[in-house]
Amino acid sequence: TSLIAALGYALKYSGHRVLMVDADRATDGFSLFILGPQGMSQIDSFKPASTFTGILNEFERSKVIEVSPREVHRLAPGEHNLTYDAIISGKGLYGDDSNVSDSAASDWNRQYERPVFQQGVRALFDAIRGWNRYDYVLVDSRGGFSFESTDVAAAADSFVIVTEATNTNFYQDRNLVDRINGAAQQMSTRSLLRGIIVNKATN
Protein backbone atom coordinates (compact mmCIF):
# COMPACT_ATOMS: atom_id res chain seq x y z
CA THR A 1 0.00 0.00 0.00
CA SER A 2 2.77 2.45 0.88
CA LEU A 3 4.60 1.59 -2.34
CA ILE A 4 1.53 2.18 -4.51
CA ALA A 5 0.76 5.44 -2.70
CA ALA A 6 4.31 6.78 -3.13
CA LEU A 7 4.57 5.67 -6.76
CA GLY A 8 1.16 7.10 -7.63
CA TYR A 9 2.07 10.44 -6.09
CA ALA A 10 5.43 10.55 -7.91
CA LEU A 11 3.89 9.70 -11.28
CA LYS A 12 1.08 12.24 -10.88
CA TYR A 13 3.54 14.89 -9.71
CA SER A 14 5.61 14.17 -12.85
CA GLY A 15 2.60 14.86 -15.07
CA HIS A 16 1.55 11.32 -16.01
CA ARG A 17 -2.04 10.18 -16.39
CA VAL A 18 -2.55 7.73 -13.54
CA LEU A 19 -5.47 5.65 -12.31
CA MET A 20 -5.17 4.07 -8.87
CA VAL A 21 -7.38 1.16 -7.84
CA ASP A 22 -7.83 -0.25 -4.34
CA ALA A 23 -8.57 -3.95 -4.76
CA ASP A 24 -7.82 -4.73 -1.11
CA ARG A 25 -11.26 -4.99 0.44
CA ALA A 26 -9.74 -6.45 3.63
CA THR A 27 -7.99 -3.30 4.87
CA ASP A 28 -9.07 -0.37 2.62
CA GLY A 29 -5.67 1.17 3.38
CA PHE A 30 -5.04 2.66 -0.04
CA SER A 31 -8.55 4.15 -0.18
CA LEU A 32 -7.94 5.91 3.12
CA PHE A 33 -4.65 7.30 1.78
CA ILE A 34 -6.34 8.64 -1.35
CA LEU A 35 -9.27 10.17 0.51
CA GLY A 36 -7.05 11.76 3.13
CA PRO A 37 -7.96 13.27 6.50
CA GLN A 38 -11.30 14.59 5.25
CA GLY A 39 -12.06 11.50 3.20
CA MET A 40 -14.92 10.07 5.20
CA SER A 41 -17.01 13.12 4.30
CA GLN A 42 -16.61 12.26 0.61
CA ILE A 43 -17.75 8.64 0.70
CA ASP A 44 -21.47 9.35 0.32
CA SER A 45 -20.80 10.93 -3.07
CA PHE A 46 -19.09 7.83 -4.50
CA LYS A 47 -21.22 5.84 -6.92
CA PRO A 48 -21.01 2.02 -6.90
CA ALA A 49 -19.19 2.21 -10.26
CA SER A 50 -16.42 4.18 -8.50
CA THR A 51 -15.73 1.39 -6.01
CA PHE A 52 -14.13 -2.00 -6.53
CA THR A 53 -16.87 -3.72 -4.52
CA GLY A 54 -19.65 -1.91 -6.38
CA ILE A 55 -18.17 -2.86 -9.75
CA LEU A 56 -17.95 -6.54 -8.77
CA ASN A 57 -21.48 -6.52 -7.31
CA GLU A 58 -22.92 -5.16 -10.55
CA PHE A 59 -20.93 -7.62 -12.63
CA GLU A 60 -22.18 -10.51 -10.51
CA ARG A 61 -25.79 -9.37 -10.99
CA SER A 62 -25.75 -8.37 -14.65
CA LYS A 63 -22.44 -9.54 -16.20
CA VAL A 64 -21.98 -5.91 -17.21
CA ILE A 65 -18.94 -3.88 -16.20
CA GLU A 66 -19.77 -0.33 -15.17
CA VAL A 67 -16.66 1.67 -14.25
CA SER A 68 -16.53 5.35 -13.36
CA PRO A 69 -13.25 6.46 -11.74
CA ARG A 70 -13.72 9.32 -9.34
CA GLU A 71 -11.58 12.45 -9.17
CA VAL A 72 -10.31 12.98 -5.63
CA HIS A 73 -9.01 16.50 -5.06
CA ARG A 74 -6.24 16.89 -2.48
CA LEU A 75 -5.77 20.63 -2.98
CA ALA A 76 -6.25 22.10 0.50
CA PRO A 77 -3.35 23.82 2.28
CA GLY A 78 -0.94 21.19 3.58
CA GLU A 79 -2.33 18.56 1.17
CA HIS A 80 -0.71 16.94 -1.89
CA ASN A 81 -1.80 19.71 -4.28
CA LEU A 82 -2.86 16.99 -6.73
CA THR A 83 -6.06 15.50 -8.11
CA TYR A 84 -6.13 11.70 -8.27
CA ASP A 85 -8.26 9.44 -10.46
CA ALA A 86 -9.25 6.58 -8.19
CA ILE A 87 -11.46 3.56 -7.66
CA ILE A 88 -11.73 3.02 -3.91
CA SER A 89 -12.32 -0.39 -2.34
CA GLY A 90 -15.89 0.25 -1.16
CA LYS A 91 -18.17 2.52 0.82
CA GLY A 92 -17.83 0.56 4.06
CA LEU A 93 -14.24 1.59 4.79
CA TYR A 94 -12.80 -0.16 7.85
CA GLY A 95 -16.07 -2.04 8.15
CA ASP A 96 -18.08 1.16 8.64
CA ASP A 97 -21.61 0.50 7.37
CA SER A 98 -22.87 3.96 8.30
CA ASN A 99 -22.40 5.06 4.69
CA VAL A 100 -24.43 2.13 3.35
CA SER A 101 -28.14 1.45 3.73
CA ASP A 102 -29.14 -1.57 5.82
CA SER A 103 -30.48 -3.35 2.76
CA ALA A 104 -27.21 -2.89 0.88
CA ALA A 105 -24.78 -3.50 3.76
CA SER A 106 -24.44 -7.18 2.95
CA ASP A 107 -23.39 -6.29 -0.62
CA TRP A 108 -20.41 -4.30 0.62
CA ASN A 109 -19.18 -7.07 2.90
CA ARG A 110 -19.90 -10.09 0.75
CA GLN A 111 -17.44 -12.77 -0.28
CA TYR A 112 -17.38 -13.72 -3.97
CA GLU A 113 -17.15 -17.11 -5.54
CA ARG A 114 -13.77 -17.37 -7.21
CA PRO A 115 -15.04 -17.72 -10.82
CA VAL A 116 -17.15 -14.57 -10.40
CA PHE A 117 -14.21 -12.70 -8.92
CA GLN A 118 -11.86 -13.80 -11.71
CA GLN A 119 -14.30 -12.88 -14.46
CA GLY A 120 -15.13 -9.54 -12.85
CA VAL A 121 -11.53 -8.48 -12.31
CA ARG A 122 -10.52 -9.48 -15.81
CA ALA A 123 -13.49 -7.60 -17.31
CA LEU A 124 -12.63 -4.54 -15.21
CA PHE A 125 -9.01 -4.51 -16.33
CA ASP A 126 -9.99 -5.11 -19.97
CA ALA A 127 -12.38 -2.15 -19.81
CA ILE A 128 -9.69 0.14 -18.41
CA ARG A 129 -7.19 -0.99 -21.06
CA GLY A 130 -9.77 -0.30 -23.77
CA TRP A 131 -10.08 3.34 -22.75
CA ASN A 132 -6.41 4.04 -23.52
CA ARG A 133 -6.82 6.98 -21.13
CA TYR A 134 -4.03 6.38 -18.63
CA ASP A 135 -0.26 6.07 -18.81
CA TYR A 136 -0.24 3.94 -15.67
CA VAL A 137 -2.83 1.96 -13.74
CA LEU A 138 -1.66 1.05 -10.22
CA VAL A 139 -3.59 -1.58 -8.27
CA ASP A 140 -3.20 -2.28 -4.57
CA SER A 141 -4.12 -5.91 -3.94
CA ARG A 142 -4.80 -7.91 -0.82
CA GLY A 143 -1.76 -9.50 0.79
CA GLY A 144 -1.22 -13.21 1.28
CA PHE A 145 -2.23 -16.25 -0.74
CA SER A 146 -5.98 -15.70 -1.07
CA PHE A 147 -7.42 -15.62 -4.59
CA GLU A 148 -8.33 -11.97 -4.00
CA SER A 149 -4.58 -11.38 -4.14
CA THR A 150 -3.34 -13.91 -6.69
CA ASP A 151 -6.12 -13.36 -9.22
CA VAL A 152 -5.70 -9.59 -9.28
CA ALA A 153 -1.99 -10.05 -10.01
CA ALA A 154 -2.77 -12.64 -12.68
CA ALA A 155 -5.19 -10.30 -14.46
CA ALA A 156 -2.78 -7.36 -14.46
CA ASP A 157 -0.17 -6.66 -17.14
CA SER A 158 2.53 -7.20 -14.51
CA PHE A 159 2.96 -7.36 -10.75
CA VAL A 160 5.52 -6.49 -8.07
CA ILE A 161 6.10 -8.49 -4.90
CA VAL A 162 7.00 -6.70 -1.67
CA THR A 163 8.83 -8.99 0.73
CA GLU A 164 11.19 -9.11 3.69
CA ALA A 165 14.75 -10.44 3.75
CA THR A 166 14.19 -13.80 5.43
CA ASN A 167 14.35 -17.37 4.16
CA THR A 168 10.73 -17.86 5.17
CA ASN A 169 9.57 -14.89 3.12
CA PHE A 170 11.58 -15.90 0.07
CA TYR A 171 10.11 -19.40 0.24
CA GLN A 172 6.62 -17.91 0.46
CA ASP A 173 7.37 -15.56 -2.43
CA ARG A 174 8.26 -18.52 -4.67
CA ASN A 175 4.98 -20.22 -3.80
CA LEU A 176 3.06 -16.99 -4.31
CA VAL A 177 4.47 -16.59 -7.82
CA ASP A 178 3.50 -20.21 -8.56
CA ARG A 179 -0.06 -19.50 -7.42
CA ILE A 180 -0.26 -16.34 -9.52
CA ASN A 181 0.95 -18.31 -12.55
CA GLY A 182 -1.68 -20.95 -11.83
CA ALA A 183 -4.37 -18.30 -11.62
CA ALA A 184 -3.20 -16.84 -14.92
CA GLN A 185 -3.63 -20.24 -16.57
CA GLN A 186 -7.17 -20.45 -15.21
CA MET A 187 -7.96 -16.96 -16.48
CA SER A 188 -6.16 -17.35 -19.85
CA THR A 189 -3.92 -14.37 -19.06
CA ARG A 190 -0.14 -13.96 -18.98
CA SER A 191 1.36 -13.07 -15.61
CA LEU A 192 4.63 -11.14 -15.52
CA LEU A 193 6.70 -10.63 -12.39
CA ARG A 194 8.00 -7.09 -12.87
CA GLY A 195 10.17 -6.95 -9.79
CA ILE A 196 10.71 -7.71 -6.11
CA ILE A 197 11.06 -5.02 -3.46
CA VAL A 198 12.77 -6.03 -0.23
CA ASN A 199 11.28 -4.16 2.71
CA LYS A 200 12.67 -3.66 6.23
CA ALA A 201 16.28 -4.23 5.14
CA THR A 202 19.15 -1.94 6.14
CA ASN A 203 21.90 -3.27 3.84
Image (cartoon, grey):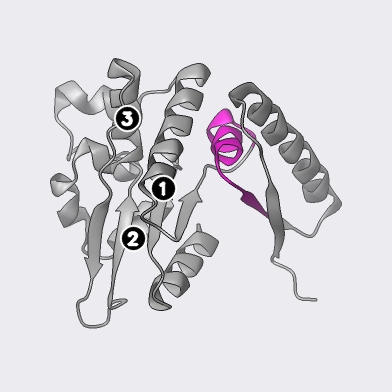
Q: What is the secondary structure assignment of the residue under circle 3?
A: loop
How far apart marks 1 and 2 lie (CA) works out to: 9 Å
Q: Is residue 156 visible?
A: yes
Left or right: 98, with 28 as reference point: left
Image coords of residue 192 (percent x, y): 68, 45
Residue 143 x, y percent position in the rendering: 58, 43
147 in magenta: yes
From what the image shows, is residue 91 above or below residue 15?
A: above
Sort mark 2 into few (<14), some (14-19) or many (20+) by Cα contacts within 10 Å.
Answer: many
Q: Which residue is mark 1?
A: 22
First-in-chain label (1 vs 3): 1
Q: Amino acid type of disc 2?
A: Ile
Q: Which residue is mark 2?
A: 34
**Boundaries of the magenta span:** 145-161
Relative to residue 102, is residue 30 drawn left or right?
right
Residue 73: give x, y in percent of width and height.
22, 67
What secondary structure is marked by label 1? Answer: strand
Asked whether 161 or 120 is in front, the reply is 120
Q: The residue tagged with tag 2: helix, strand or loop?
A: helix
* Residue drawn at (35%, 53%) of the image: 31
Q: Disc 1 vs disc 2: Cβ atoms closer than 8 Å?
A: yes
144 to the left or right of 167: left
- Mark 1 or 3, which is nearer the eye? 3
Crowd class of label 3 (few under 14; some 14 to 19; many from 20; radius 10 Å)? many
Can you see residue 113? no
Image vertical order of residue 172 relative to residue 102, above or below: below
Residue 52, quarter of picture: top left
- Tell me which corner region of the image, top left, top right, bottom left or bottom right, holds residue 156: top right
Structural distance between the alpha carbons of marks 3 and 2? 23 Å
98 up-or-down from 40: above or below: above
